[in-house]
Amino acid sequence: PDAYRSVFSKKYGSLEIPSAGIHFTWDLIQRIKDKGGLISFITLHVASTEMLSNRKIQTKCVEEVTINEEYYEVPQATADIINTAKQNGGRIFAVGTTVTRCLESAYSREHNCLKASSGWTALYIHPGYQLKVVDCLLTNLHQPKTTHMVLTGQFAGVDLLMKAYASEHIQSCKFDMFGDCMLIIQDEGQG
């Protein structure tokens, strides 16, 4: 059904929707472009890590968690747009935790840039991970003790994220797929 697809999905293969993308319409995308924002696309086949039972953390040491692999493709045009933006001091906004994992996985330490590539990633981003590509994150509100919440903590800082989640405002929001979202904009140099 269309309610379960983002407007820019084109290829079959995902087990779940990259749910942060469902907040976008073609009108919103055009408005971002009209304000000077550049939009680029990837292919992402979300695995069962999206399902709450598979992403719930069962250990007290978040660094020991492993997650399922997901297939991604970063086209050359996307790599070029992102690398040019980074070289010119631009900021990279990822729409969702899975997109963040994809872009960080496609980063080449050898070349110090995002590489056009395809493959499988099981990259687990948690506090302490040094982000190389993504500067800002648009993501849904996530349930506690999940890998998605841990990745979000890397962007916002764990203390600030916990404070925000304890607020009355957040308590009235909807979580996960089809819920509310938040935009985390890191201070320059953070990450």
Image: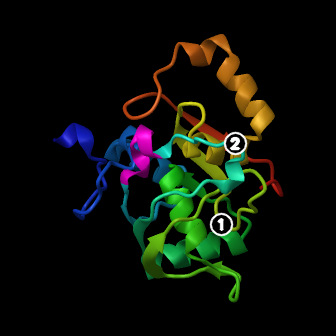
What secondary structure prevails in the magenta region? Answer: helix
User: Separation of disc 2 and disc 1 at Cα?
Assistant: 17 Å
Kind of residue at disc 2: Gly
Secondary structure of the residue carrying tag 2 is helix
Residue position for label 1: 133
| Picture quadrant where residue 45 is located | bottom left
Image: magenta residue range = 48-54
Q: In this view, does 101 lie above or below 168?
A: below
Nearest to the observer: residue 47 or residue 186: 47
Q: Where is residue 125 in the image (x, y as percent from the top left)?
A: 64, 56
**Element marked by disc 1:** loop
Which quadrant of the structure image shows residue 132? bottom right
**Can residue 47 be seen from the camera position used here?**
yes
Q: Quadrant of the C terminus?
A: bottom right
Horizontal and vertical percent position of residue 61 = 72, 47
Vertical relation: 103 (above or below) 175:
below
- Say which of marks 2 and 1 sits in front: 2
Q: Which residue is drawn at 83% across and 58% down?
A: 189
Magenta-drawn stretch contains 153: no
Query: In the rendered view, does 152 fall on the left or right side of 71?
Result: right
Crowd tier of the residue under label 1, counting other residues whose Cα lies within 10 Å: few below 14, some 14–19, many 20 or above: many
* Residue that label 2 marks: 153
Q: Which residue is drawn at 24% across and 62% down?
A: 10
Q: Which mark sits nearer the N-terminus, 2 or 1? A: 1
Task: Report whether 25 appears left or right of 161.
Answer: left
Name the image quarter holding the N terminus. Answer: top left
View extreme (front): residue: 59
- List x then y, in percent, for residue 12: 22, 62
Farthest-out residue, right: 189
Residue 176's spot in the image, x, y percent? Answer: 44, 33
